Amino acid sequence: MVAMLDKPGLTLAIIFGAAIFIFGGAPYLAMMLFFLMLAIFVTKYGYYEKKDMGIYEHDRSWENVLSNGLVPAICAALSVYAGPLPYIASIAAVTSDKFASELGVLSGEPLSLDGFKRVKPGTSGAVSILGFIMSLCGAALIGIGAIFLFGISPTAALLVTFAGFSGSIVDTLFGVLEERGIGTKGTTNIICAIVGALIGLYIR
């Protein structure tokens, strides 16, 4: 992921990483690094198809880092009060969204929730069966990772998967507004992470 960031993005990523480590410790930082590795994989997967469609994004800047890292960093800072599950669930949400957006585009023309018409791949507020499946897989991978990094129960991991998938669904709903010029991809990503974190508050 470092190679995919410009200098402002790399600087902000280091700041977030340091804050997460200071407030949460090694497991929290390891979880974020796990997300970053997964993000690299799904971003590069289907490179030629994405490039032909004109939707491949390689260079990322501080806006992308902010939208994916702000809420988890806040959750790490508040973990002394709320525990690790809001942090884990917020990571699950952004991972779920990442899997849906990067892998779902490979399924052809998705269905827009705005008018239920077929639109070009990469359109915000659009869904596909593959996107739904990959969204669940992304959230589940974070849940499984949390079993090993945080020692959460399989039941909690399943609920983390639900939280992450829910965040991705809300992201898609707000994507409809994004296509209408209300908000940006960054704001929808932040909302996605917030939804995951809020559900994570109630996971036991």
Image (cartoon, grey):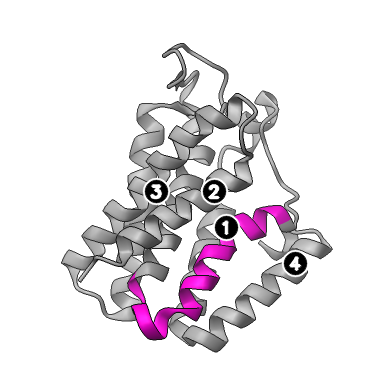
- List the residue tagged with mark 2: 189
Q: Earlier in the sequence, mark 2 or mark 3?
A: 3
- Structural distance between the alpha carbons of marks 1 and 2: 6 Å
Magenta residues, as a range? 63-85
Q: Which residue is mark 1?
A: 68
Give the residue type that dot 2 points to.
Asn
Q: Are marks 1 and 2 in contact (CB under 8 Å)?
A: yes
Q: Answer above or below: position of 16 versus 104.
A: below
Q: Earlier in the sequence, mark 4 or mark 1?
A: 4
Which residue is the site of mark 3?
167
Q: Quick check: is 177 in the magenta stretch?
A: no
Looking at the image, can residue 88 be seen? yes
Which image quadrant for residue 62?
Answer: bottom right
Q: Label 3: few (<14), some or many (≥20) within 10 Å?
A: many
Q: Amino acid at mark 3?
A: Gly
Which of the image's four quarters has the C terminus?
Answer: bottom left
Marks 4/2: CA distance? 19 Å
Q: Residue furthest left?
A: 155
Q: Residues within 10 Å of mark 2 (few under 14, many from 20)?
A: many
Residue in the image at 33% along x and 80% along y: 150
**Residue named by callout 4:** 10
Find the distance from the CA under tag 1 to the CA under tag 3: 12 Å
Secondary structure beneath label 1: helix
> Who's the residue at 51% across and 27% down the image?
176
